[in-house]
Image (cartoon, helix red, strand yellow):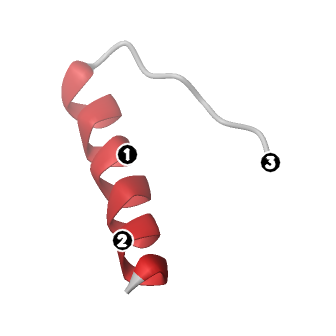
Amino acid sequence: MKFIVFDNPKVIGGLLRMVFGIKREVKN
């Protein structure tokens, strides 16, 4: 998969939140 890096911190934070949220759902 190719990831596009955005300079906007809000976009990066949103992507990180999405990724960690998915990881949490998989764990539970």
* Vertical order, 27 against 4 (above or below): below
Q: Is residue 8 left or right of residue 23?
A: left
Where is residue 5? Give x, y as percent: 53, 23
**Quarter of the image containing the C terminus?**
bottom left
- Mark found first going from the N terminus, 2 or 1: 1
Q: Amino acid at mark 3?
A: Met
* Vertical order, 11 against 14 (above or below): above
Q: Mark 2: give few (<14), some (14-19) or many (20+) Cα within 10 Å.
A: few
Residue visible at 25% across and 35% down in the picture? 13
The numbered disc on residue 24 is: 2
Q: Which residue matches tag 1?
A: 15
Tell me the element at label 3.
Answer: loop
Q: Which residue matches tag 3?
A: 1
Residue visible at 36% across and 71% down in the picture? 24
| Cα distance in 3D space between marks 2 and 1 | 14 Å
| Foreground pick, 21 / 3 | 21
> Do callouts 2 and 1 mark residues in contact (Cβ within 8 Å)?
no
Where is residue 21? Give x, y as percent: 32, 66
The quadrant where residue 7 appears: top left
> Do callouts 2 and 3 mark residues in contact (Cβ within 8 Å)?
no
The quadrant where residue 18 appears: bottom left
- Mark found first going from the N terminus, 2 or 3: 3
Q: Amino acid at mark 2?
A: Arg
| Cα distance in 3D space between marks 1 and 3 | 14 Å
Residue visible at 43% across and 55% down in the picture? 19
* Vertical order, 26 against 19 (above or below): below
Tell me the element at label 1.
Answer: helix
Q: Mark 1: give few (<14), some (14-19) or many (20+) Cα within 10 Å.
A: few
| Cα distance in 3D space between marks 2 and 3 | 21 Å
Q: How many marks?
A: 3
Residue found at the very far top of the displayed protein: 7
